[in-house]
Image (spheres, helix red, strand yellow):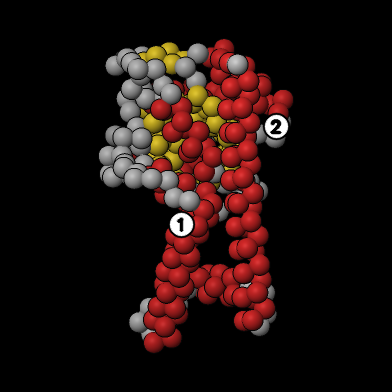
Amino acid sequence: MAASDQTVLQFFPSTTSLSAKVHPVVVFSICDCYVRRQDQAERVIGTLLGSILPDGTVDIRNSYAVPHNESSDQVALDIDYHHNMFLSHQKVNPKEVIVGWYSTGFGVSGGSALIHEFYAREVANPVHLTVDTGFRNGEATIKAYVSVNLSLGDRQLAAQFHEIPLDLRMIEAERVGFDILKKTIVDKLPNDLEGMEASMERLLALFDDVYKYVDDVVEGRVAPDNSIGRFITDTVASIPKMPPAVFDKLLNDRLQDHLLLLYLSSLTRTQLSLAEKLNTASQIL
């Protein structure tokens, strides 16, 4: 057979160079929708909103659930509800567009290809975000996928989901809540001081890791990485230079302000509770 008569089986992995960044509020919203789902629903799916950053990263900032019914061989989406919700979000924040869709569960399921095909008509190269609300690996695993086409000559045969890098960065206040969300059993919610203590412990652990890495590079046990070195340099340079006494005073002043706010908020809650009880008693009498 001549070379020109051969049919080539090929992938088109152009979308696999993408990466995604998801904000914690999206994860919290997905978990809330899963808790509020209908009794017969095994999973929740919905639309992801965000934007494309200049470096090509898909920035996922918002989401909403879409009612659906699915069986072993078909999936039915409420398309009208999806479009109405998107139009409502556009009125509030016109910069957020559809960037993909999400589903709860571990990994990609059988009906995911059908749903992904629908969102591919809404936006080019949609991102599929999965959140494991079943804690199969002991925590809520979060992954992002894109679809890679498999073609035989000019005919498309199938689509394969390919995992892409996912960045889940958050501030410390969000991380305290996210760490609680990842656990299967929670004894009690930490108060503000306990959350601050946990943040300080993580910060000290990061300092120890940086010290160990720098020592290993200096001693020749680890090959140096210029990108890590520049990141450490920029981090150290961003710290304001001040005497230890000034730093201690600044920290203590901020801590006292924080405790004062907690005290005032507690007084406010107590006053509102007393006012509500007095109002109820006056209506009864």
- Left or right, residue 97 beside residue 132: right
- Using the image, determine if residue 211 lies above or below residue 271: below
- Using the image, determine if residue 160 lies above or below residue 72: below
Q: Quadrant of the N terminus?
A: top left
Q: Quadrant of residue 237?
A: bottom right
Q: Which residue sits furthest front? A: 285
- Left or right, residue 6 beside residue 59: left
Q: Is residue 92 visible?
A: yes
Pick the residue in front: 231 or 179.
Answer: 179
Binning the other alpha carbons within 10 Å of mark 2 as few (below 14), some (14 to 19) or many (20 upward) gives: few
Q: Is residue 147 visible?
A: no
| Spot occupied by residue 23 in the image (x, y as percentages of width and height) | 54, 44
Residue drawn at the location 66% of the way across and 22% of the way down: 88
| Spot occupied by residue 231 in the image (x, y as percentages of width and height) | 56, 69
Q: Which residue sits furthest bottom? A: 219
Pick the residue in front: 284 or 4.
Answer: 284
Q: Amino acid at mark 1?
A: Glu
Q: Earlier in the sequence, mark 1 or mark 2?
A: 2
Location of mark 2 (residue):
93
Q: Quadrant of residue 240?
A: bottom right
| Spot occupied by residue 92 in the image (x, y as percentages of width and height) | 71, 28
Q: Amino acid at mark 2?
A: Asn
Location of mark 1 (residue):
194
Residue drawn at the location 66% of the way across and 71% of the way down: 250
